[in-house]
């Protein structure tokens, strides 16, 4: 999506600037989450771990609540609220001095994080329609990946330059980034189309009664688990099982981030004449190939051949992620009735929350039993998910499935 085409979507430019600033701030914090909180608060690492886990549990409830609020008020207001909550949370981190305060502050951040996703997705649906919506989703993913990568580099620089003070600086800069993003949303709202609010009854009962959509969400759970391979499964598999050097993890993560940022718009252009369900299913096939490549790497000699195998598998994983992300968002949004869009996207986003809960314990158990079992399990559920998505091409609304066009 070019700057010119972005400008034709009313309110899109300040919205994207806000997304970039938000992701830049998050990039400062996310790679150092537990260490960051430990250093800023001075609390023991075990206390920090328990507090973050408790806050994450609170955050799980934020998705459905956010969905209802989006439909009742509007997506932009809820999105602004997520920024305000996180700004307050990060500004308060340096003043945390106990477990209860930690849970309260971390819960503010967790609620803002979880509610952000259905709110941002719903607001994009308000800003753009058809092909422009798909391009806007792709451009947002590109901007956020670039900003997140830059934020990670800046966090390393801040800590190395300022030592312990650098962690406090990160907290304050992150809080400021959410304030700037809020201002961008205010500017965006001056030009954006008016948002519809829900006057329908039934709420989540109506969403859950939509069987094709529920089947789509069930299939999406498999895809979100595959997205957890790089941050959750690969560190254990590569280092503990295959004996790869630890530095390789940073290289693979950076490679994935750069390629996602650089390839999102190109892949979207390639998919523009494909049905969204078929594009998702093809992404599933490529993710299955990635699982096979990771499993096959164990058969290679140790050393450079295994490093090459892991790089190759990660390239396939990255392509599968690129193939899946934009069509999945666009299909889910187009499937949802406008008056219940917030609730639909909230249910969709719960798949990511569930993956974050399932993946650490589930992946570890499968790797501990037999490393190949993890890749076989993921390949199986991805196969089933891809079949379900193809079947749904005849059951979901035709205008949601259809190619968005150039």
Image (spheres, rainbow, N blue to C red):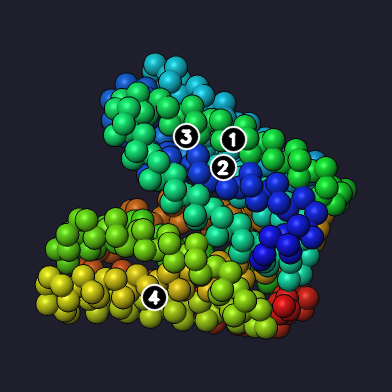
Q: Return the x and y of residue 310 as percentages of the image width and height.
A: 26, 71
Residue at image coords 17%, 76%: 305
Residue 371 appears anywhere in the view: yes
Q: CA distance from mark 1 to mark 3?
A: 20 Å
Residue bearing the label numbered 1:
178
Q: CA distance from mark 4 to mark 2?
A: 29 Å
Q: Return the x and y of residue 166 as percentages of the image width and height.
A: 36, 28
Q: Secondary structure at mark 3?
A: helix
Of the residues under marks 3 and 4, which one precedes in the sequence?
Answer: 3
Residue bearing the label numbered 3:
55
Of the residues under marks 2 and 1, which one precedes in the sequence?
Answer: 2
Q: Quadrant of residue 8?
A: bottom right
- Relative to residue 13, is residue 176 drawn left or right? left
Of the residues under marks 4 and 2, which one precedes in the sequence?
Answer: 2
Q: State yes or no: discs 4 and 1 in contact (Cβ < 8 Å).
A: no
Comparing 376 with 30, the one in front is 30
Instruction: Please identify the quadrant where the C terminus is shown.
Output: bottom right
Q: Secondary structure at mark 1?
A: helix
Q: State yes or no: discs 2 and 1 in contact (Cβ < 8 Å).
A: yes
- Frontmost of labels 3 and 2 is 2
**Is 5 above or below relative to 179?**
below
Circle 1 Cα neighbour tier, 10 Å, few/some/many (<14 / 14–19 / ≥20): many
- Frontmost of labels 4 and 2 is 2
Of the residues under marks 3 and 2, which one precedes in the sequence?
Answer: 2
Quick one: which residue is furthest to the front in this view?
4
- Relative to residue 266, is residue 246 drawn left or right? left
Q: CA distance from mark 3 to mark 4?
A: 34 Å
Residue bearing the label numbered 4:
316
Residue bearing the label numbered 2:
22
């Amino acid at each position: 999506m070019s700057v010119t085409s972005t400008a034709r979507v009313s309110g899109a430019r300040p919205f994207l600037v806000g997304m970039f600033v938000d992701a830049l701030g998050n990039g400062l914090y996310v790679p150092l989450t537990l260490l960051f909180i430990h250093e800023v608060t001075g609390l023991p690492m075990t206390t920090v771990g328990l507090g973050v886990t408790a806050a994450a549990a609170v955050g799980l409830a934020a998705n459905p609540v956010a969905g209802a609020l989006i439909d009742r008020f509007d997506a932009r207001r809820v999105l602004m609220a997520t920024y305000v909550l996180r700004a307050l949370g990060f500004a308060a981190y340096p003043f945390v001095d106990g477990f209860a305060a930690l849970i309260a502050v971390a819960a503010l951040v967790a609620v803002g994080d979880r509610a952000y996703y259905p709110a941002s997705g719903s607001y994009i649906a308000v800003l753009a329609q058809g092909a422009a919506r798909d391009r806007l989703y792709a451009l947002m993913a590109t901007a956020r990946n670039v900003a997140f990568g830059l934020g990670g580099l800046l966090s390393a620089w801040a800590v190395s330059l300022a030592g312990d003070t650098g962690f406090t600086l990160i907290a304050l800069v992150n809080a400021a980034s959410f304030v700037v993003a809020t201002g961008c949303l205010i500017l965006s709202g001056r030009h954006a189309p008016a948002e519809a609010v829900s006057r329908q009854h039934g709420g989540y009962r109506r969403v859950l009664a939509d069987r094709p959509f529920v089947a789509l969400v069930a299939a999406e759970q498999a895809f979100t688990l595959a997205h957890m391979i790089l941050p959750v499964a690969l560190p254990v598999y590569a280092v503990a099982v295959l004996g790869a050097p630890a530095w390789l993890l940073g290289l693979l993560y950076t490679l994935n981030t750069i390629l996602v940022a650089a390839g999102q718009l190109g892949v979207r252009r390639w998919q523009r004449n494909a049905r969204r369900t078929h594009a998702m299913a093809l992404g599933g096939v490529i993710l299955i190939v990635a699982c096979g490549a990771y499993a096959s790497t164990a058969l290679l000699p140790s050393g450079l051949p295994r490093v090459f195998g892991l790089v190759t598998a990660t390239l396939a994983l990255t392509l599968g992620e690129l193939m899946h992300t934009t069509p999945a968002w666009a299909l889910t949004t187009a499937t949802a009735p406008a008056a219940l869009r917030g609730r639909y996207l909230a249910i969709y986003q719960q798949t990511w929350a569930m993956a974050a809960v399932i993946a650490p314990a589930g992946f570890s158990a499968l790797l501990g039993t037999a490393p190949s079992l993890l890749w076989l399990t993921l390949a199986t559920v991805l196969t089933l998910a891809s079949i379900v998505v193809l079947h749904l091409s005849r059951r979901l609304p035709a205008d949601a499935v259809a190619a968005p066009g150039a």
